[in-house]
Amino acid sequence: MQTKPIASSRNVSSRKKALQCKLYELLQPSPEREEIKVETFADPLDQLSSATRRELAIHLVDRNSRLVAQVRSALTRIDEGSYGFCESCEGLIAPKRLDAVPWAPLCVSCQARQEAAQIDSGHFADAA
């Protein structure tokens, strides 16, 4: 795999700062965690509403956890010098993609293939 920086050190440095800020934001306490607790209600509709809120909160916490892992991985790739290269095809990730999603591990083509495969298999998860 290539390990040359894809852009000026200023661009990588600014993306690293953006990633560090995003990580800090993601690690702050979230109200969704409080919604996960199981509550019992006498009214079946209240019980159903609580279960729905809990399921949504679980989904949001899970999505947040995956995003934390992606941001940490991007910071590691910066430190290792492999940031900006697709983890699948090892080609360059377009700077516009990294501007939009600085933690993106895949180029647009590989991301599209991965999402199509996940949809076909019925296991689609939020992706970068």
Image (cartoon, grey):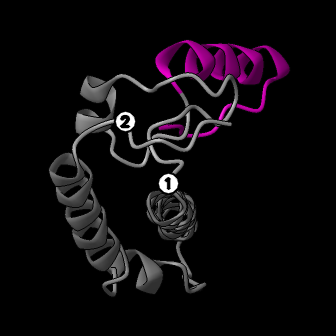
| Residue assigned mark 2 | 6
Helix, strand or loop status at disc 2: loop
Please identify the dominant SS of the magenta region. Answer: helix
Near-viewer residue (28 or 102): 102
Answer yes or no: do the residues labelled 2 and 1 have beta carbons within 8 Å? no
Tell me residue 79's x, y (percent): 47, 66
* Residue drawn at point x = 40 percent, y = 74 percent: 32
Tell me residue 33's x, y (percent): 46, 82
Residue type indicated by callout 2: Ile
C-alpha gap between disc 2 and disc 1: 9 Å
Residue type indicated by callout 1: Gly
| Residue assigned mark 1 | 81
Tell me residue 50's x, y (percent): 49, 70
- Point out the tag, 2 or 1, that comes first from the N-terminus: 2
* Quadrant housing residue 18: bottom left
Helix, strand or loop status at disc 1: loop
Q: In the picture shown, does residue 124 fall above or below 23?
A: above
Near-viewer residue (103 or 7): 7
Res. 95 mark: none
Residue that sits furthest to the front in the current view:
4
Q: Does the magenta run of residues contain 27?
A: no
Residue that sits furthest to the right in the current view:
121
Direction from residue 63 to residue 100 in the image, left or right: left
Near-viewer residue (126 or 109): 109
